[in-house]
């Protein structure tokens, strides 16, 4: 069964303390690995799409990487405004279906 | 460019009733997907429509249904509501399918009493 697992479930960081979020997936024929950010009371906001192992993408303090079994979201020198829930999702090849992980709640304290 | 809109934003229904939620995608997007989000299960895929055709459906009972119109707007319907259907229902659109960037609406918060 297709599965996406995120760890840790929650993370507290001090402002400026860098860390990484993990997303492991078991999806046959991965068509794409997606990262989203969700603020309370809002819909998820698209961050990155990764299509093949070795691919990396960056946006401000965030960098996403992809291997054949997992993806990492690296957060460098986070700020309090980076506090949110980060969601990882995988699209299976051959079907229009997206499987989400349960998310990781990040809190960055000033 | 206007984003994805969903109506209504909040809804309170009684067990046994039915409900219809609406989603207007970003202009030019032909794929619309629906998701249910709950604290315990997270985001779960309901179904995806492209050019008025349902291309895939998640593991939900037949009480959950949807459709897409020729202008790409979509509706989802839940019949015979149960307490467990209380959730945030999210709609997302993309130009061609879930393998591409999807843009989410703000969601409809459904409470079943």
Image (cartoon, rainbow, N blue to C red):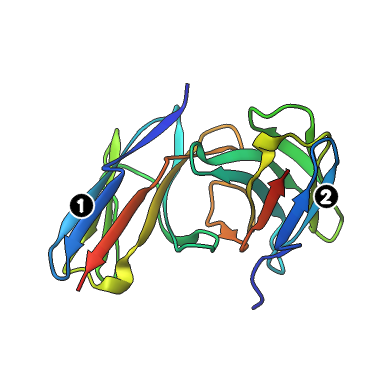
Q: Which residue is mark 2?
A: B20
The residue carrying pointer 2 sits among few (fewer than 14), some (14 to 19) or many (20 or more) residues within 10 Å by Cα, namely few
Identify the disc placed on residue B110: none
Residue A31 vs B62, above or below: the answer is: below
Residue B81 in percent (x, y) is at 78, 37
Towards the viewer: B93 or B107: B107
Q: Is residue A82 visible?
A: yes
Q: SS of the residue at dot 2?
A: strand
Name the residue: 24% across, 73% down.
A79
Which is in the foreground here, disc 1 or disc 2? 2
Q: SS of the residue at dot 1?
A: strand
Q: Is residue A60 visible?
A: no
State the CA–CA distance, disc 1 to disc 2. 40 Å
Location of residue B60 (image quadrant) = top right
Farthest residue, direction bottom = B1
Location of residue A110 (image quadrant) = bottom left
Name the residue: 31% across, 43% down.
A9
Residue B52 in percent (x, y) is at 82, 47
Name the residue: 79% across, 48% down.
B13
Answer with left or right where residue B73 lies relative to residue A28. right
Chain bearing mark 1 = A
Q: Which residue is mark 1?
A: A20
């Amino acid at each position: 069964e297709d599965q996406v697992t995120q760890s840790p479930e929650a993370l507290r960081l001090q402002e400026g303390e860098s860390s990484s979020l993990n997303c492991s997936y078991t999806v046959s024929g991965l068509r794409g690995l997606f990262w989203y950010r969700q603020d309370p009371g809002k819909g998820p906001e698209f961050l990155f799409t990764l299509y093949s192992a070795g691919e990396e993408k960056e946006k401000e303090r965030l960098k996403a990487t992809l291997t054949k079994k997992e993806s990492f979201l690296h957060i460098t020198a986070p700020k309090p405004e980076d506090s949110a829930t980060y969601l990882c999702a995988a699209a299976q090849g051959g079907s229009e279906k997206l499987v989400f992980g349960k998310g990781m709640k990040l809190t960055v304290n000033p | 460019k206007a984003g994805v809109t969903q109506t209504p934003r909040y809804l309170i229904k009684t067990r046994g009733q039915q409900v219809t939620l609406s989603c207007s995608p970003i202009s030019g997007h032909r794929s619309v997907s629906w998701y249910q989000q709950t604290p315990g299960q997270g985001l779960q895929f309901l179904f995806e429509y492209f050019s008025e055709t349902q291309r895939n459906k998640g593991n939900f009972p037949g009480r959950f249904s949807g459709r897409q119109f020729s202008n790409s707007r979509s509706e989802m319907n839940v019949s015979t509501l149960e307490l467990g259907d209380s959730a945030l229902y999210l709609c997302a659109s993309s130009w061609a399918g879930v393998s591409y960037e999807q843009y989410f609406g703000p969601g409809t918060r459904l409470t079943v009493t």
